[in-house]
Image (cartoon, grey):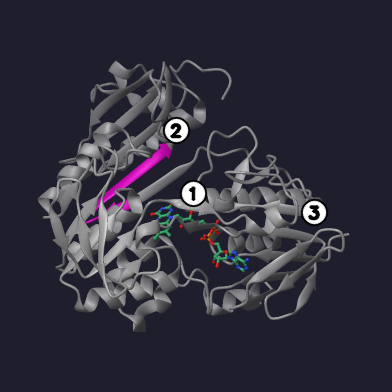
């Protein structure tokens, strides 16, 4: 019988799972443990509004209000890392010497930023993952004139937009030949390139040999492949994350690019689940890193533990905000394959557009900027497993609404 559930990691996945467990009627004890000090904050604002805000206002970024912990009867242990899992005795060990027994253990340990070896250990070099990282960056912004961001993915670009808004000179350096190369369609990459250039950000793509310049252990700038030297006050390294699977690995769980789990989020160790950014679901092509996925996988683990109906696997979705632009994306944008096709649909609003990505004839993702209606319709098509022909998707006069709801759609097999 499950009396005590321990959740390691009190961020989007861990908190959501505790909440779902209560919503589904679990009445035993729930303990959340996180090595971050203080009440958990939301992650998405950390590269956006948090950087333009002030410490007195940090309360507005709380993931849950203080009263939530009482209301949901969740015990929170913060500021202590878990350093071992003992599956045989159903115990975990904390860095302060405590041990906790569990009946079910949920690993919501997320991911950690990849480091750039030549910049490792230098002063004025930042990553952006946890509230502490964002607070340090916000302090650095106060006295800086020029920032370099290495990595033109969503987090790097969001940070670049925040720095420009604060009046800094900004350089973004990307090794691939386009921004967002691993996560977005070419048209969306081009859209964000233009957006940042119009805001005065200097974008350097195709830079595979960037040198990090430093003096006395402090970052001073970069030298690009072209020989151009750029002096800067700080560097943000935004080159992706690695799953924080070290505890599970040491305990003997099967690990790939994440903790391997089945569709109920069960790891290969009895009574141990993994959810959120750290989990890799069997059969999935990749690990998903988004708030929606954190919540969705939390709900699946909670349903399994409480023996309540398993929610359907949802279509993944994601958003990004840069300047006054909101991107919404549904599905997984395919990259690096031969048979990809794209349709661009102009939106009703000025500057609005959506990109519909196809793997052969199958619609697999829709990305929309300034066009929430197209995003909703695209998501509906993906949920209903119907693919409009690319020429129809690109035709603003085509009635996508009727099509998306299945009235005239052709169901596809096998998703
Ligand atoms: C700056 C930023 C902006 C983002 N913007 C967006 C966005 O716009 N839209 C979107 O959908 N997603 C966004 N994301 C992604 C989203 O925030 C993540 O997918 C989400 O936070 C994953 O939640 P998680 O709980 O799985 O992991 P995490 O948020 O990584 O949390 C893991 C927690 O586990 C704790 N932990 C790890 N190991 C231990 C241990 N051994 N002992 C104790 N505690 C431990 C960590 O301290 C951490 O608090 C953004 C992420 C970042 C960093």
Instruction: Confirm if mark 1 falls within 8 A of ligand 1.
Output: yes
Decide if residue 16 is on the left or right side of residue 21: left
Residue 228 visible within the image = yes
**Segment colored magenta:** 320-330
Q: Which quarter of the image is occupied by the C terminus?
A: top right
Q: Residue at x 74, y 71 (%)?
A: 93
Q: Residue at x 40, y 57 (%)?
A: 117
Residue tagged by mark 1? 289
Residue 39 higher or lower than 88, as above or below: below
Q: Which x, y percent locates residue 127?
A: 38, 63
Q: Earlier in the sequence, mark 2 or mark 3?
A: 3
Real-space Cα distance between discs 2 and 1? 21 Å
Q: Which mark is residue 380?
A: 2
Q: CA distance from mark 2 to mark 3?
A: 35 Å
Nearer mark to the viewer, of 2 and 3: 3
Q: Give me the disc on residue 271.
A: 3
Mark 1 and mark 2 in contact (Cβ < 8 Å)? no
């Amino acid at each position: 019988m499950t009396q005590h559930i321990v959740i390691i990691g009190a961020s989007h996945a861990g908190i959501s799972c505790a909440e779902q467990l209560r919503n589904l009627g679990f009445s035993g004890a729930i303990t959340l443990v996180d090595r971050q000090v203080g009440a958990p904050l939301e992650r998405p604002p950390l590269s956006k509004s948090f950087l333009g805000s002030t410490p007195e206002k940090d309360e507005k970024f709380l993931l849950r209000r203080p009263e939530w912990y009482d209301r949901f009867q969740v015990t929170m242990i913060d500021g202590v890392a878990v350093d071992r899992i003992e599956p045989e005795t159903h115990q975990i060990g904390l860095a302060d010497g405590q041990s906790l027994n569990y009946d079910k253990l949920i690993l919501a340990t997320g991911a950690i930023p990849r480091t750039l070896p030549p910049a490792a250990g230098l002063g004025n070099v930042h990553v952006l993952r946890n509230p502490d990282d964002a607070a340090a960056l916000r302090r650095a912004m106060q006295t800086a004139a020029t920032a370099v961001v290495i990595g033109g993915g969503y987090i790097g670009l969001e940070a670049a937009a925040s720095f420009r808004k604060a009046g800094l000179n900004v350089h973004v350096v990307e090794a691939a030949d386009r921004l967002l190369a691993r996560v977005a369609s070419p048209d969306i990459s081009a859209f964000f390139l233009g957006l940042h250039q119009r805001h005065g950000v200097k974008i350097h793509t195709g830079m595979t040999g960037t040198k990090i310049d430093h003096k006395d252990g402090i970052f001073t700038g970069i030298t690009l492949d072209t020989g151009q030297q750029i002096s800067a006050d700080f560097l943000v390294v935004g080159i992706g994350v690695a799953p924080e699977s070290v505890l599970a690995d040491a305990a003997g769980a099967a690990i790939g690019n994440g903790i391997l789990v089945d569709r109920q989020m069960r790891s290969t160790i009895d009574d141990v689940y993994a959810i959120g950014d750290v989990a890799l679901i069997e059969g999935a092509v990749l690990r998903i890193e988004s708030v929606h996925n954190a919540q969705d996988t939390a709900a699946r683990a909670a349903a399994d533990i409480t023996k309540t109906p398993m929610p359907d696997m949802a279509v993944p979705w994601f958003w990004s905000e840069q300047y006054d632009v909101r991107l919404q994306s549904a599905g997984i944008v395919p990259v690096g394959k031969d048979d990809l096709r794209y349709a661009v649909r102009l939106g009703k609003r000025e500057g609005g557009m959506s990109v519909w990505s196809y793997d052969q004839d199958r619609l697999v993702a829709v990305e929309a900027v300034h066009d929430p209606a197209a995003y909703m319709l695209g998501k509906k098509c993906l949920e209903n497993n119907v693919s409009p022909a690319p020429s129809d998707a690109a035709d603003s006069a085509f009635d996508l609404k009727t099509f998306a709801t299945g009235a005239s759609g052709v169901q596809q097999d096998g998703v």
